[in-house]
Image (cartoon, rainbow, N blue to C red):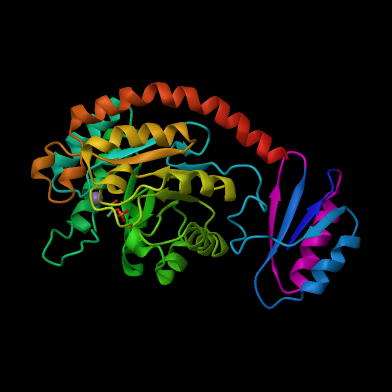
Amino acid sequence: MIINMNEGATEDEIQHVIERVREAGFQAHVTRGTERCIVAAVGSGGKRHELEALAAAGGVAEVVPIAQPFKLVSRQVKPHRSVIEVGDVKIGDGSFAVIAGPCSVESRQQIFSTAQAVKAAGARLLRGGAYKPRTSPYDFQGLGVEALRLLSEVRKQVGLPVVTEVMSTEDAELIAEHADMLQVGARNMQNFALLRRLATVSKPVLLKRGPSATVKEWLLAAEYLLAGGNPKVVLCERGIKTFETETRNTLDLAAVALARELSHLPVMVDPSHGTGRRTLIAPTSRAAAALGADGIIVEVHPCPERALSDGAQSLDFRGFRDLMQSLAEPMRAVSIPQLRMDKAAAKS
Ligand code: PEP
Ligand code: MN
């Protein structure tokens, strides 16, 4: 349930509502907007009728049910958009954040040269897999701890915040020490033990959409993180499984717009895994910018033909520079009207 406070509600009235929500057996999550305060009562097993009775309490405008199964993630609970800070980079502030780097960290030379090249071309964050979720156990599985150390070094020397994937609860602590943002890969979107663990770390999480997950399931996966105490979540559409085989996955751009409509969390797009084809990265990235996505995550390798994973969808340095140039115009064109639309939606 949501308890919408009046514009002029006093701090005492808000505190009273929070206490009553807790007494009724729910958690109280408070969102303070510029004009109004919203208290969301979430959890199971509490006494609903006690929440409904709060309609008569001082400072309360209305008590309404939360329409969606996801609660803290929904725009009903938090109408204005969340901005997630990763190191010194803000995701969701109306700019278009570009995360770039190799699918896997393969060597010192490979990760350093890629970090320098993508930074020079305008990327704001570096990606690089240390622990890789591979379909075949015979494929390259990542350099593990050695890759984490390289990512830490490159972060310090090149000055880009680092994003890397966490596949298991056991690695969470170590990876959180080395990385600025933890990626939950598509295959682990509904690994609930992992989500519960990452809800307790202080680092932001990039939550990829599962290849067969509905938008609702994706947002419920994000709810695990928020409900468990980590509000720093960025969603990422990376393509879903369909009958089409010409592309590796089907990039569901409508889901990006829908997720931004239903949720206040930033939504990014992964055109590399979403298409599996280098030639489709620029057009789909421009489409992502045009529909208001909060950024992209792109695979870049010094020599894609030698990449140990995902070479076919990786751009070389020149390809990445070209991509960034082709994005300059859509990025400029979109960010201002998008911000205006978001502000208007938050007010309504
Ligand atoms: C990746 O980012 O390299 C990756 C494996 O992504 P996904 O989980 O989307 O397949
Ligand atoms: Mn990859």
At x 18%, y 39%, the residue is 301
- 344 on left or right of 58: left
- 241 on left or right of 218: left
Furthest toward the bottom, the residue is 45
- Does residue 20 show up magenta in the picture? yes
Q: Observer-nearest residue: 35 or 340?
A: 340
Q: Is residue 303 above or below residue 9?
A: above
Residue 146 locus on image (x, y percent): 18, 54
Furthest toward the front, the residue is 243
Q: Is residue 109 above or below residue 258?
A: above
Residue 37 locus on image (x, y percent): 76, 48
- 34 on left or right of 124: right
Q: Please indicate, yes or no, whether residue 96 appears anywhere in the rendered image.
A: no
Residue 245 locus on image (x, y percent): 24, 53
Residue 51, by quadrant, is: bottom right
Location of the C terminus by quadrant is top right
Q: Please indicate, yes or no, whether residue 85 appears anywhere in the rendered image.
A: yes
Residue 121, by quadrant, is: top left
- 42 on left or right of 37: left
Q: Which residues are magenta?
A: 8-35
- Does residue 280 show up magenta in the picture? no
Residue 95 locus on image (x, y percent): 48, 31
At x 79%, y 53%, the residue is 4
Residue 41, by quadrant, is: bottom right
Q: Observer-nearest residue: 27 or 155?
A: 27
Q: Is residue 338 above or below residue 59?
A: above
Q: Observer-nearest residue: 239 or 180?
A: 239
At x 35%, y 37%, the residue is 284
Furthest toward the left, the residue is 306
